Amino acid sequence: MRPASVLLIVGVVLVIGGVLALANPFAASLAVTTLVGMVLIVAGVLQSWVAITGAGVPHRIWTGFVGLLGLLAGVSLIANPLAGVVSLTLLVGIVFLLTGAVRLGMAWRLRETPLFWFLLLSGAASVLIGFLVVTDIGAAATSLLGLLLGIQLLADGIGLIALGLIARRS
């Protein structure tokens, strides 16, 4: 199969996944939580294994501790996905707040450049979204992760379809 065809097929699959995630953001949020839980379990097991078997690994105790925390967090997310959705949504809200604050700080430092307004508006939007998520976590938890997943899948799918079409022409 040609690479252009693979790009087109993967792009179409991602677009379909994005539409499905946007159609049912709560189910997509649960899927995100389960996926993050599985990744944390695998990472925790691998990191713990490195800490146990790696005699020359620096900071073995910390490596093992962080691996154990990742393992416990992953099991917790999978054991109670609804609480995991709330936790991950809160984390996303905090990330929006922090990145928005950093962008606002960067805008202030670059106020004499053409980037000022872009950074100012982007930072203000991120802070506003983060504030809305954190102050109404109950409403945000039911849909935010699924909506973000759907938007990301759509954007990636459209991008891959465009790349596939360009690759076909050349």
Image (cartoon, rainbow, N blue to C red):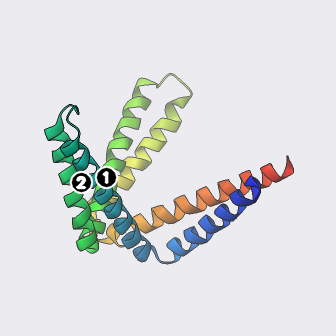
Residue 17 in the image: state x and y as whole percent.
56, 70
Instruction: Tell me if residue 151 comes above or below residue 126 in the rendering.
Output: below
Question: Looking at the image, which residue is at 26% across and 62% down?
Answer: 74
Instruction: Tell me if residue 103 comes above or below residue 48 in the rendering.
Output: above
Q: Is residue 127 left or right of residue 86?
A: right
- Amino acid carrying label 1: it is Ala
Question: Looking at the image, which residue is at 25% across and 44% down?
Answer: 50
Secondary structure found at label 2: helix
Instruction: Tell me if residue 39 comes above or below residue 33 in the rendering.
Output: above
- Amino acid carrying label 2: it is Gly
Residue 127 in the image: state x and y as whole percent.
36, 48
Secondary structure found at label 1: helix
Crowdedness near tag 1: few (<14), some (14–19) or many (≥20) residues, C-alpha within 10 Å: some
Please identify, in this view, whether the residue under mark 2 or under mark 1 is nearer the observer.
1
Residue 10 in the image: state x and y as whole percent.
64, 62
Instruction: Tell me if residue 66 comes above or below residue 71 in the rendering.
Output: above
Asked if marks 2 and 1 touch (Cβ < 8 Å), the reply is: yes
Question: Looking at the image, which residue is at 19% across and 35% down?
Answer: 55
Task: Identify the disc placed on residue 43.
Answer: 1
Task: Identify the disc placed on residue 70.
Answer: 2
Q: Residue furthest toward the top?
A: 112
3D distance between C-alphas at marks 2 and 1? 7 Å
